[in-house]
Amino acid sequence: MLLAGDVGGTKTALGIFSQESGPRAPLAHASYASGDGESLAALVRRFLATNELPIDRACFAVAGPVLDGRTKITNLPWVLDERGLAEELGLESVRLINDLEAIARAIPTLTPGDLHILNHGTPADGGAIAVIAPGTGLGEAFLTWDSFRYVPHPSEGGHGDFAPTTPLEIGLLQDLRQQFDHVSVERVCSGPGIIRIYDYLRRAGHFTSSRETAALIVNAADPAAMITQAGLQRPTPDPLSAAALEMFVSILAAEAGNLAGGIPPRLLPVLGEGRFLQSFIKKGRLAGLLTNLPVHVVLTRSAILGAVLYDFGSNTSGPPALFAT
């Protein structure tokens, strides 16, 4: 019996799996706000108290680099150690895997129902696959074909330099350089990044927002979600929130074009309006190449699936399902 988890800066999802039920059918599952627990072990104990399933090992997909079985969660004051967690939880073993590596590991197993197509493109046999995942931070990973199977590789590419592509984005960079020594793309292409973009546009006076909407955003427990909701409201979106989302999508698309990856389901209504693909392929001499690349939005929570596959020792051989759509 395996306890698997997706441990992020904002949320932690946990599930119990067995070889017999398979990696897509948890016997029990729950999701918690990461900040509600003083440690991962505390959240795990809370989860296990809700059922009587016997657990002998665990595998966690974690938001941060894993070195020698140890990691510090990005955007969360948790330091995790495989041996320490195994002892604390009374388990035979605990394995830690970078969350984007876990997502990448799951990609070849996804079905057409797990995906939303933004650009059909022309798939290349054995071509590399890139994954980009904005959330509390910005995760990036990629897969390469070794003639037998796809091999996932983690990356900390989200901490690369933010490269603005428009005068408005240049203004955003100049504004953020007054706050941070290093302005990474994660600073603007993440949940907190949406808030920074909104705040910059508000202070710069480029767009306005109603007092009611502004008050809702300021007082919201999750301002990024409120900005997204206000910006996607139809038929009359909040102008400032909509502008913030438009800039966010443009930045995300440009970074996805650098990596050639995918984007989150929450923004599907604006991703299909053309802005994303315009920014995605705007790479000068490489525009033709990017025009032919398949682009998909992954609709499922694939990090925990990847953690289960990692423990089960799956062989992700053969062409991924997304190439067959």
Image (cartoon, helix red, strand yellow):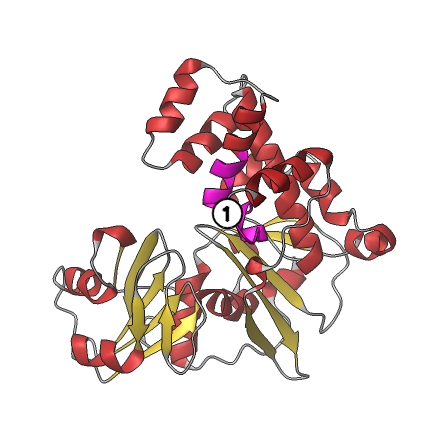
Residue 194 counted in the magenta span: yes
**Secondary structure under badge 1?**
loop
Going by the numbered disc 1, the residue's amino acid type is: Ser
Q: Which residue is mark 1?
A: 190
Q: Residue at x 62, y 52 (%)?
A: 296
Q: Is 98 placed above or below 226 here? A: below
Image spot of residue 31 (x, y percent): 28, 53
Residue 32 visible to the viewer:
no
Q: Residues within 10 Å of mark 1 (few under 14, many from 20)?
A: many
Q: Which residues are magenta?
A: 180-197
Q: Is 215 placed above or below 259 here? A: above
For residue 27, side relative to residue 215 (left or right): left
- Front-most of residues 238 and 303: 238
Which part of the image, by quadrant, shows the C terminus? bottom right
Q: Residue at x 62, y 36 (%)?
A: 247
Which part of the image, by quadrant, shows the N terminus? bottom left
Q: Is 164 placed above or below 91 here? A: above
Q: Is 65 placed above or below 36 here? A: below
Image spot of residue 159 (x, y percent): 56, 59
